[in-house]
Image (cartoon, rainbow, N blue to C red):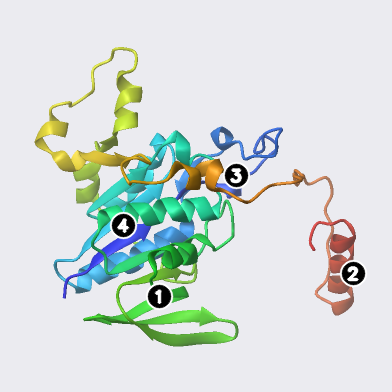
Amino acid sequence: MSLKIVVLAKQVPDTRCVGKDAMNADGTINRAALPAIFNPEDLNALEQALRLKDTHPGSTVTILTMGPGRAAEVIREGLYRGADNGYLLTDRAFAGADTLATSYALATAIRKIGEYDIIIGGRQAIDGDTAQVGPQVAEKLGLPQVTYVEEIQEVRENYIRVKRHIDGGVETVEGPLPIVLTVNGSAAPCRPRNAKLVQKYKRALGAQEKAAITKDGAALPYAELYESRPYLNIVEWSVADVNGDTKQCGLSGSPTKVKKIENIIFQAKESKTITGSDADVENLIVELLANHTIG
């Protein structure tokens, strides 16, 4: 049985590199100051998709992401590891989207893709930690969903069995196809890049990346390859391409309103050594709560 699998992936700022320049004055993330990476739990989801491709000959894995032109790097990373193709949702109208507007955009793109058996993504993105987008996509598409997935154990005609993490252990869940899955960070890590696939796709570019290269009149390197090898052209979709409603996209479709932002930058000025005693741990927690470091 061959499967059509869509992997939801996001390019996120690397929050491990947060410093004093990480935030803008208005409280938004200064994305230019942070390196962009493939969202870690989306890599866990990609691995589950690739394992299904390995065990179900003829299956295809499609990467779907949303962001500016540079987010095409996420699709390239997916191609390097074994994905077959990808689509980049990119439009000024998508900017500023909260989880509701993001899930709307992804759902409209999935409808345009048309055929799918499994839609899979990471549990949450490290730049938001909401874990809302996957379930919202399922609701908008009218599909069943399983969250906190750690392993896909079996897939056959109109049937899937997965292991999911719950507090205090794991449980096995069965469901029908098509289905939406969100994958936990405790699932198997994604395989490394494949050297042959890196060579095959290393010149894959989106339209915005090509425009950036040629904006000052420079020639596009290896331009002939993009005609002879169509798989090197990363497909970009706008709101109009997916028949989206601009009122439900970006800021227009985002009911979430931020009322107050506090920038907290951790800078080590002193250190403290504590023992493992209950009293020391309790005193530390009280201190952290009093300083609003936690809680």
In the image, is residue 185 above or below residue 75?
A: below
Q: Amino acid at mark 1?
A: Pro
- Observer able to see residue 1: yes
Indicate which disc, 1 or 4, sits on the residue closer to the N terminus.
Answer: 4
Residue 272: x percent and y percent? 84, 58
Instruction: Determine the CA span between mark 1 and mark 3.
Output: 37 Å
Q: Determine the CA span between mark 4 and mark 2.
A: 54 Å
The residue identified by callout 4 is 111
- Disc number placed over residue 264 in the picture, else none: none
The residue that disc 1 covers is 144
Q: Nearer the viewer, mark 1 or mark 3?
A: 1
User: Is 72 placed left or right of 254 in the picture?
Assistant: left
Q: Residues within 10 Å of mark 2 (few under 14, many from 20)?
A: few
Query: Would you name the residue on which mark 2 appears?
Result: 283
Gap between marks 3 and 2 measured at Cα: 29 Å
Labels 4 and 2: the sequence-earlier one:
4
**Callout 1: SS:** loop
**CB contact under 8 Å: marks 1 and 3:** no
Between the C-alphas of marks 1 and 4, the distance is 16 Å
Q: Quick check: 5 above or below 71?
A: below
Mark 4 element type: helix
Q: Which residue is mark 3?
A: 17
Foreground mark, 4 or 3, reads 4
Which kind of residue does numbered mark 3 sit on?
A: Cys
Label 3 Cα crowd, 10 Å radius (few <14 / some 14-19 / many 20+): few
Mark in the foreground, 4 or 2: 4
Residue 117 placement, left or right of 285:
left
Identify which amino acid the numbered label 4 is placed on.
Arg
Quadrant for the N terminus in the image: bottom left
